[in-house]
Image: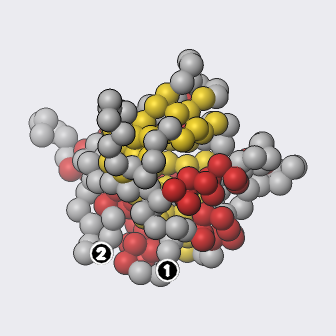
């Protein structure tokens, strides 16, 4: 640690780095960014979901999780944000490995206020560059604003139904939801509602 730099300063700098990584992810969909190291969390709490929650949430917004377990309690205490049902939430924090009814319930905005659409943050196993073999997971191609031609990534640990729900929620653009996928190692991909998704490989 540099002289005069306390732990609290480190936390602020890391939060700023994490916020920039998330912004870069949305600006360049399908490009893998890297979050700084996550802070320790209580047992049963996904550290990366808590990290992104700490960066994006505050007392002015609401969030949903899959139940009111340790993650919900930790994020509420950490951010001052209020836990609500998914249908009323600004953000969803959840594991992406199983189908999520909450993803289908999130607000998609209104014609008058499309920006009121929610953002989902889902944890996945790994985000990889597509290899010669199909590997495991979903191999996806992304096109749209912020992508020069096409971006490709292989996602392990994302249930295909959640991908289908994300695509379906965004067919009525500008209504829709935005999505972040984050791994335990801190790799993160941002998928705004403007992105177009093609599936290239099987589960």
Rounded to the nearest whole Å, what is the CA distance between mark 1 and mark 2? 13 Å
Colour scheme of this structure image? Answer: secondary structure
Q: Is residue 7 above or below residue 31?
A: below
Residue 114, x across and y down, in percent: 78, 48
How many numbered callouts?
Answer: 2
Q: Which residue is mark 2?
A: 44
Marker disc for residue 67: 1
Using the image as rendered, state which of residue 182 and residue 63 is in the foreground.
Answer: 182
Quadrant of res 72: bottom left
- Image quadrant holding the N terminus, namely top left
- At 83% from the left edge and 54% from the top edge, which residue is drawn? 110
The spot of residue 61 in percent (x, y) is: 61, 62
Q: Which residue is pictured at 29% across the width and 54% down the height?
A: 184
Circle 1 — which element? Answer: loop
Packing grade of label 1 (10 A; few <14, some 14-19, many >=20) is few
Q: Residue at x 36, y 39 (%)?
A: 134
Residue 98 drawn at (x, y percent): 46, 67
Residue 173 visible, this orientation: yes
The reply to whether discs 1 and 2 touch (Cβ–Cβ < 8 Å) is no
- Sooner in the amino-acid sequence: mark 1 or mark 2: 2
Residue 33 visible in the snapshot: no
């Amino acid at each position: 640690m540099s002289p005069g730099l306390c732990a609290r300063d480190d936390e602020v700098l890391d939060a700023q780095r994490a916020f920039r990584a998330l912004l870069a992810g949305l600006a360049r969909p399908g490009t893998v960014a890297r979050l700084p190291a996550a802070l320790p969390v209580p047992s049963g709490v996904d550290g990366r979901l808590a990290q992104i929650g700490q960066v994006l949430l505050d007392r002015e917004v609401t969030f949903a999780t899959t139940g009111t377990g340790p993650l919900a309690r930790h994020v509420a205490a950490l951010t001052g944000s209020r836990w609500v049902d998914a249908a009323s939430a600004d953000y969803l924090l959840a594991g992406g490995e199983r189908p999520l009814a909450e993803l289908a319930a999130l607000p998609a905005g209104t014609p008058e206020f499309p920006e009121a659409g929610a953002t989902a943050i889902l944890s996945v196993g790994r985000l990889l560059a597509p290899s010669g073999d199909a590997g495991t997971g979903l191999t996806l191609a992304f096109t749209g604003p912020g992508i020069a031609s096409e971006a490709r990534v292989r996602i392990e640990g994302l249930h295909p139904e959640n991908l289908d729900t994300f695509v379906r929620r965004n067919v009525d653009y500008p209504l829709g939801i935005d999505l972040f996928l984050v791994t335990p190692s801190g790799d993160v991909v941002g998928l705004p509602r403007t992105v177009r998704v093609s599936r290239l490989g099987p589960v």
